[in-house]
Image (cartoon, grey):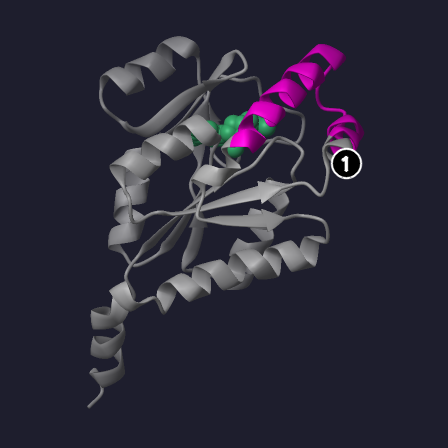
Amino acid sequence: MNKGQLIVVSGPSGSGKDTVISKAIERLGEKAFLSVSMTTRRKRGSETDGVDYYFVSEKEFLEHIENGDMLEYAKYGSNYYGTPAQPIKDRIGNGEIVFLNIEVQGGASVRKLIPEAVKVFILPPSVRELERRLRKRATEDEEAIQKRLKIAEDEMERAVEYDYIVINDDLDDAVDALISIVKGQTSKNDNINEIIREVFSHV
Ligand code: 5GP
């Protein structure tokens, strides 16, 4: 049985990290899972409650924090975002690979809490490209785009806190890079006991 893995992925809005993560999960198969976060932000057009996020009121979100249900949470822009703890615990216990798509404050909280988590930062090829992608997406108004660009700048300065950097210029290359990181982790020496046990389990 493989040891579960926790992969934290951060990167500025417009870095394309959502797509990179979902394609990597698709290729890794059923043992890979994306944590569904809770948020107080409004649902965008194509999003589904319980799939993309659990969309809740601020009151409900604060109650979850109070009850200790969250692994981590942060305020991003004017909204709260957080990771429900129980599914993560269950999936990792089950030997699954769990991806967290979270911003940098959440990334820092997870690092303190779970130092074994692997932290990957996804960067756009340039700030200009980042702005172009944000505008093309057209899901936010100008004020929100400006806010996200400002946050993106601050976030990119914190890329140094991460174990790996992936530049999302060509999507397939970025997905390959993320998968290599995950697979490399599986064969890392601190998993040696699990690997040896597995190799010899049929002997
Ligand atoms: P968006 O509104 O574009 O879906 O997400 C905004 C930011 O919030 C993204 O950087 C995303 O990674 C981050 N985010 C999503 N879920 C969580 C979460 O559970 N915790 C934290 N800390 N950040 C999150």
Please provide percent x and percent y for residue 112. Answer: 28, 35
114 to 61, vertically: above or below: below
Q: Is residue 195 left or right of residue 58?
A: left
In the rendered image, which quarter is residue 193 located in? bottom left
- The residue sitting at 50% across, 32% down in the picture is 158
- The residue sitting at 57% across, 32% down in the picture is 156
- Crowd band around label 1 with a 10 angstrom C-alpha radius: few (<14), some (14–19), many (20+): some
Please provide percent x and percent y for residue 160. Answer: 49, 39
Q: Is residue 180 covered in magenta?
A: no
User: Of residues 145 and 53, which is closer to you in this image?
Assistant: 145
User: Of residues 96 and 12, which is closer to you in this image?
Assistant: 12
Residue 1 shows in the view: no
Q: Which residues are magenta?
A: 131-157
Total residue callouts:
1
- The residue sitting at 55% across, 62% down in the picture is 27
Location of the N terminus by quadrant is: bottom left
- The residue sitting at 31% across, 41% down in the picture is 87
171 to 42, vertically: above or below: below
Location of the C terminus by quadrant is: bottom left
Q: Secondary structure at mark 1?
A: helix
Q: Main SS of the magenta segment?
A: helix
In the rendered image, which quarter is residue 74 located in? top left
User: Of residues 67 and 115, which is closer to you in this image?
Assistant: 115
Which residue carries the number 1 mark? 129
